[in-house]
Image (cartoon, helix red, strand yellow):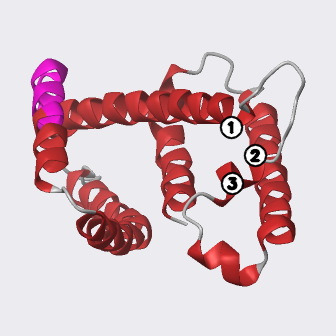
Amino acid sequence: MHTAYVEILFRYFAAYFLYPFIQDKRRVNRYTQLAVLYSAVFGIVTLIVAIAYLGGNQLEKTTWPNLTSFKIVKLPVMERFDLFVVAYLVISVFSVSLVLMWSSTRGFREAWRLKQKYALFMGCIVLILSSEIIQYHSDEENFSKSIRTIGVWIEYVYPLFLYVCTRCKRNFLKPEKGAET
């Protein structure tokens, strides 16, 4: 649940950071919709396979249900197919982490006029310290639960806050019609 939520939130915010760098803005909508369709179909198929293979009770207790289902795949070329799946997951998580770190450093640069290099150093220090502080699985679960709660508030309240701020900024910065310049 946590990984799916982070990926959805990542796609939602990454689109705003990556959009200014897209050169052909007219054609991007089609490919974006195809990517969303692919992700939705892949997620539904994965969910159906996990429910069919594990069932309801075992699905709640299993930490990595998809990895458990990949352990039953027997290919003559590969002995352990699940190791390739883990390598794929590491690569995909790494790429998502890189884009998230880049977009956060860019956000720091735009919001607080902080150089991206210094924002990157601060982000790395925060990641290292948080990985040292969180040592037990229960701590990680509590941290993930609180981050999910905060993320939901940010996802729904933050865009409204930005809308109100931009409307107020437009109203205050709008020049009066009769004013001399």
Q: Is residue 39 above or below residue 54?
A: above
Q: Is residue 181 visible?
A: no
Disc nearer the start of the sequence (1/2): 2
**What residue is at 82 percent from the left and 48 percent from the top?**
37
Residue 82: mark: 1
Residue 157 location in percent, x, y? 37, 72
Q: Is residue 130 above or below residue 127?
A: below
Residue type at mark 3 is Thr
**Does the magenta segment cover residue 120?**
yes
Question: Which quadrant of the figure has residue 83?
Answer: top right
Left or right of residue 84: residue 145: left
Residue type at mark 2 is Phe
**Dot 3 crowding, Cα within 10 Å, few <14, some 14–19, many 20+:** some
**C-alpha gap between disc 2 and disc 3:** 5 Å
Residue placed under numbered mark 3 in the picture:
68
- Magenta residues (range): 112-124
